[in-house]
Amino acid sequence: MRTWDHRYDRPDYLFGTAPAAFLERHIGVIPPASTVLAIADGEGRNSVYLAQRGHQVTAFDTSTVALEKARALALTKSVTVRHEVGGIEDWDWSRPYDCVLGIFIQFATPEQRATLFQEMKRATAPGGLILLHGYRPEQVDYGTGGPPSRENMYTEGMLRDAFSDCQILHLSSYDAVIEEGVGHSGRSALIDLIARKPEAA
Ligand SMILES: C[S@@+](CC[C@H](N)C(=O)[O-])C[C@H]1O[C@@H](n2cnc3c(N)ncnc32)[C@H](O)[C@@H]1O
């Protein structure tokens, strides 16, 4: 299996330089000048967009090749993003952010996902937002992006359970044609979640 560094080692941006349509659609839900943590941000299309919209963004990913491209993208757009090398396994989740963003982070197996969702909530400040965008199990049949592992995908029931201690502001399953570089291209089985962590635990 090719590593992420190999996948990203190409002249163009594997997932394009435009933000995920989900993020563009819901950008208004994030309060002005928020601190945002972008998990597994890849080549920076989402973190750079958030910075362009005036947010203070920290992003991490395990791929150093992707991070170099993310830094170059930020430079091109004249914005500052704190791009760090890091994995979900060793990230310091104790630092709180106004918003925690996970877009197409379905490399996480069910075991990793349980911990990851807990850590995402830990890294969200009281009253802060969690934005999650990914694939449903049907995506494996479409084969237009994402890992070929049904168990890594999300369902509404799974997300309702995992975020039952938060206020679910938006939860939606839908099919759409997306064109995000060669990495995500074609009809896709998508799912979106926007949840608010309670003010007081
Ligand atoms: C499908 S890509 C999505 C990238 C980005 N979120 C986007 O939407 O363009 C998944 C990303 O997860 C990163 N990744 C894989 N395993 C990881 C881990 N254990 N911790 C953090 N990032 C990881 C990969 O390097 C890759 O950039």
Image: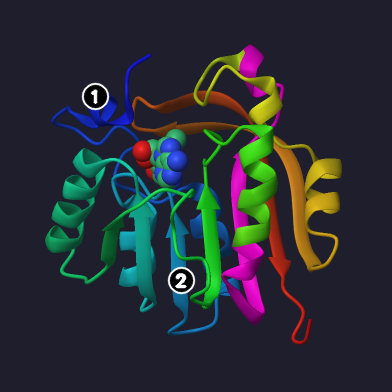
Q: Residue at x 33, y 70 (%)?
A: 51
Q: Quadrant of the N terminus?
A: top left
Magenta-highlighted residues:
120-141
Tell whether 37 sits left or right of 73: right
**Is mark 1 in CB contact (under 8 Å) with mark 2?**
no
- Which residue position holds label 2? 36
Between tags 1 and 2, which lies in front?
Answer: 1
- Which residue position holds label 1? 6
Tell whether 137 sits left or right of 142: right
Q: How crowded is mark 2: few (under 14 residues within 10 Å), some or many (20 or more)?
A: many
User: Which mark, residue 113?
Assistant: none
Confirm whether the magenta stretch covers residue 52.
Answer: no
Q: Residues within 10 Å of mark 1 (few under 14, many from 20)?
A: few
Q: How far apart are marks 1 and 2 (CA)?
A: 28 Å
Amino acid type, label 1: His
Confirm whether the magenta stretch covers residue 131.
Answer: yes
Residue at disc 2, secondary structure? strand
